[in-house]
Image (cartoon, grey):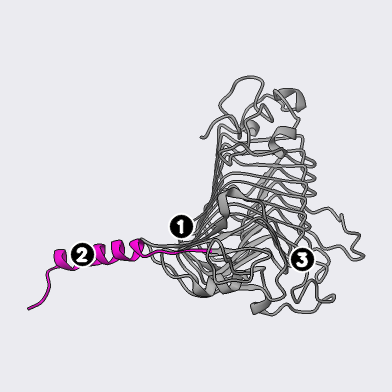
Amino acid sequence: MPRSASSIKIAATLAALVQRTHASSIYVSPTGDGSGTIDSPYGSIQAAVDAAKAGDTIYLRAGTYSPTTNIQITHSGTATSPITLRSYNDEAVIIDGEELPGTPYGLDESLPNDERGILHIENGNYWSFYNLELINGPYGIYSRDSSHNYYERISTHDNYESGFQIQGAASNNTVIYLDSYLNRDPRKNGESADGFACKEGEGEGNVIRNSRLWSNVDDGLDLYMFGSPVTIEEVYAWGNGFNLWGFSDFNGDGNGFKLGITDNPPANHVVRNSIAFSNAKKGFIDNGNPGSLTFERNTAWNNGDNGFNMRSSKSTLKNNIAAVNTNDQVSLVSGTQSSGNSWDGSTGWSNSSFLSVDYSTLAGARGSDGRVKASDFLVPASGEDIGATTQAQI
């Protein structure tokens, strides 16, 4: 006799509860050489990843891990029982990729797909990652064709490509409290190493929030050829696109937020309460994306070119600020919907228009909750509800 829909649902719920009941804790230590228990931890993160099943948690003990092959995550948890990889009790964990292949290859040499990332996630769904620092790798995190993953309090810096990249078929990934900085690409003289990138793919529901992207060789954030909307909220990009490494034929672009490319599939990205400042070139640029983007309460300040440059997207811009940027504050294609922005009024904007132009609090230590600490940085002195703020969520 066929089972009813309700009985199938109950059976699935019971199976999930049983699975959670039998979830395991797996431990790894830089000095480990055991079987994965807290008293006898693994010495290899890969060994723990290979052993983990849906619902399991991998705990990394404090210290620096120096793998000689990258960590391959190619299997999945489930919606009700994700697999978790995190530091133990918020201990300081560094995964140093300096000994991996491709750190770096020579100028103009290619980096094979399988070697990309200290963490290489491919067809790995329903994972959660917390409180990890990834340095000196051929990418810090590289996720390809993977969905429903969650990343919180990740730091990716001094890598030999983008700090954090999502690519391919990717949906419902959430990145929160990311710090990604000083990433560079000697193979390309600065052409492609961004703080955060979601590139060359498609998939709904990808989000990045309350993240900082600074001093990367190319752009802060890049959505090159990603054909689905990405939501960007409370993201701060500064100091990107400068040749801090002395590359002889420098190719860094230097935008805070680069949101597509010419001939990109139209992608209606949403950018809210975010700040681009002191980047080598533009603050926010559609870069040729022909979609209809939405910009609400963002600020572009002190960038080396336009604050907002919409050359192809008939976007909607509401309650944004562009001030103290080089060249025109904005460059907008005909048909753009613009209202309540600093450039829509008659008042000129200068440094004195803000309560503070000191970004030291924004760039300082995060709060105990993981968020960037509140400050008066680029808050309008007039009290207008316009532009981005760290003082409260929009």
Residue 215 image point, x, y percent: 77, 50
Q: Secondary structure at mark 2?
A: helix
Between residue 168 and residue 177, name the one nearer to us. 177
- Residue at x 48%, y 70% (from the top left corner): 52
Give the label, 3 or 2, closer to the camera: 2
Q: Which residue is mark 1?
A: 205
Q: Which residue is mark 3?
A: 160
Q: Which mark is residue 140?
A: none
Residue type of the residue flagged with mark 2: Lys
Disc 2 residue crowd, few under 14, some 14–19, many 20+, Cα 10 Å = few
In the image, is 276 to the left or to the right of 273? right
Q: Is residue 137 placed above or below 286 in the rendered structure?
A: below
Give the label, 3 or 1, closer to the camera: 3
Residue 373 image point, x, y percent: 63, 34
Give the label, 1 or 2, closer to the camera: 2
Residue type of the residue flagged with mark 1: Gly
- Residue at x 61%, y 36% (from the top left corner): 367
Residue type of the residue flagged with mark 3: Tyr
Magenta residue span: 1-26
In the image, is residue 92 part of the stretch drawn in magenta? no
Between residue 161 and residue 259, name the one nearer to us. 161
Between residue 330 and residue 226, name the one nearer to us. 226
Q: Secondary structure at mark 1?
A: loop
Q: Which residue is mark 2?
A: 9
Image-quadrant location for residue 362: top right
**Dominant secondary-structure state across the stretch colored magenta:** helix
Q: Secondary structure at mark 3?
A: loop
In the image, is residue 23 part of the stretch drawn in magenta? yes
Residue lying at the far top of the rendered structure: 382
Task: Calculate the distance from the C-alpha at mark 1 to the C-alpha at mark 2.
Answer: 25 Å
In the image, is 106 to the left or to the right of 1? right
Task: Give the quadrant of the N terminus.
Answer: bottom left
